[in-house]
Amino acid sequence: MSEEKSAVPAWEQRFRAARVSLPDWAEDAPDRALYVSNATGTYEVYAWDRVTGTHRQVTDRPNGTTDAELSPDGAWVWWFDDHDGDEFGVWRRQPFAGGPADRSAGTPDEEAVPGLAPSYSAGLALGRDGTVVVGRSTDEDGTTLHLRRPGAAEAVEIYRHAEYGGVGDLSYDGTLLAIDHTEHGDAMHSAIRIVRLSDGTSGTSGTTGEPAEPVETVETVETVAELDEVTGRDEPRGVACLGFAPVDGDTRLLVAHQRTGRWEPMIWDVATGAETALPLRDEQGRELPGDVSAQWCPGAEALLVEHEYEARSELFSYTLADGRLTRLDIPRGTVGGATARPDGTVEYLWSSAAEPSAVRSTAGTVVLRAPGAVPPGSVPVEDIWVDGPGGRVHALVQRPAGAGEGPFPTVFEIHGGPTHHDSDSFAAGPAAWLDHGFAVVRVNYRGSTGYGQAWTDALHERVGLIELEDIAAVREWAVASGLADPRRLVLTGGSWGGYLTLLGIGVQPDSWTLGVAAVPVADYHAAYADEMEALKSLDRTLFGGTPEEVPERFTASSPLSYVEQVRVPVYISAGVNDPRCPIRQIENYVGRLEQLGKPHEVYRYDAGHGSLVVEERIKQLRLEIDFVRRHLAAASEAEAVAGTETGTEAGTEAGTEAGDGETV
């Protein structure tokens, strides 16, 4: 590494280092693949011909691109074109070998399905015969699915419903479509509908869900099966489509279910209704205790199984003929995605908190290496379990290297979601705080995934307040154990983590020294009014209704309700095009801070729910670190001055009573 490069701080090197996602390969052309990389400084889509070793940048947009799919024959790259991160757009496509020759002149790729207006994406399925199903979500129409057959002039609407749903999968022969939906109104527990797609003729169209307007081209859509474990149930369970068997004429669908109180896979033959349980047991005959997912291996005679448990991942192969589960040899850490190749190997994206990510193969090789230097590593995590009001809470703790035993200034970095979890995986943000001498604590509060359905489903009605109880329990442990300095505690997070940050400094004003919130929910009433429909659906489930139906619940969970109680400086960053945590509700909160004279700083940037531009990410974290260091230094100086004044008075009194005492 050159002196110029080594002069760049380690935390910046981690952000600047090129990284790649797990390559996604074409079903009928496995040597053609797509991946996402930040090699140019912005996250964009790349095409990779594995035979020739050629890598080609597919997209090039100021604010980046990440959503893309290959057609099964590998001939076309489909990518989602939104506006500056607002997630509202259309699908475009270009040939795998390259786009228009005059791209430099600004000519866009062709619209993949002309006639469909911009929307939020609700999934995409590309059939082997050229059949396409596009999922759309808008505030006006709810969820709509549109089918276009090969050679058809336009797509035909085949599904419509006000509640959120989306494309599950097309069967291998293109005759069956799986739809994930929440028509029952519970966005936390989806159902699956299977419909048979006929050939198009003319007449009146048939739809599932709510009826569509008549159109000239007809697609007869017949419901052949339904899997709904919410309607009429006292204890709702979710199901989710994992994919049809990749065999022509095969009607088996791999499904994730929650019947045992956690996510597990099963096989559902949608033609006969037969369900096949998968008894997944490890070498000692024990059931896998965490959430389990699976995918078909090529040929559909085996499954690739992923087990997530206590913030780490394991991979297994499962042979359907004999029910044998075989552990794959991967390092301890987190798998960010895996795929079974036609040659029998498995490729996976792996990292740990200490070691940066890499795309590896069970053949023992590195499949795809990003160009340039490997980013510096960081420190490993410690697993901490703390008794909380709803059960034992798992936290991941990192201590700054070579900084002694503590107590340390400590950053509580709260994950988003809320249906997500922190894991033993590499993250440049926490590593940056560690480089600056902070301990980092990440809490998998109630609502997090990976700890069973009851833990994830605990968020009801008292949204936000439940999570803060768990965070408070871990905070108490961190201070009592000597890890954290109670005078230097920073609550921070992005998205739902940013929401919990603003709520936390208002509900727990004496617990935190500073608050740093990125793209947060700040005013829940206004957030609901402006957010994308998929999140409205989730909020109705979490709160048990809309703000008009249960206003007191939204008010009790809104950071704006507690802004008067905020006693610490707060930093907020926001994307002006954010459809998830829209800008207006953040401005409402900031405006109230200004009226009350509360110390705060705000940074607005021209993107959506975060940025795909590396320099912008570095800028944002640099501003956060600067804010924290300035305010902690100011607080220390104020404490020192107050301590000196108090000490002088105390020393004078002590000297009077005990002679020449030492003032400390």
Image (spheres, rainbow, N blue to C red):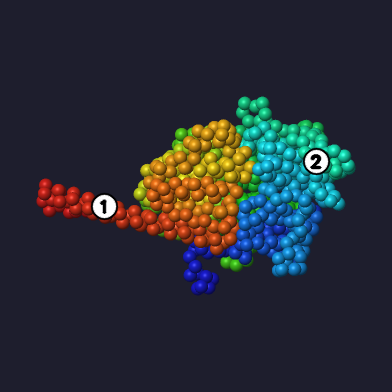
In the rendered image, which residue does mark 1 sit on? Answer: 642
Q: Nearer the viewer, residue 83 or 306?
A: 83
Disc assigned to residue 416: none
User: What amino acid type is highlighted by mark number 2?
Assistant: Leu
In the rendered image, which residue does mark 2 sit on? Answer: 176
Q: Is residue 371 above or below residue 349?
A: below
Q: Quadrant of residue 225?
A: top right
Q: Position of residue 121 (x, y in %)?
A: 69, 48
User: Furthest-front residue in view?
Assistant: 595
In the picture, measured across the screen, residue 2 lies left or right of residue 43, that is: left
Q: Position of residue 51 (x, y in %)?
A: 76, 63
Separation of disc 1 and disc 2 at Cα? 73 Å
- Residue depicted at 61% across the width and 28% down the height: 235
- Residue depicted at 53% across the width and 64% down the height: 13
Q: Secondary structure at mark 2?
A: strand
Q: Position of residue 368 (x, y in %)?
A: 66, 61
Badge 1: residue crowd in 10 Å (few <14, some 14–19, many ≥20) = few
User: What amino acid type is highlighted by mark number 1?
Assistant: Ala
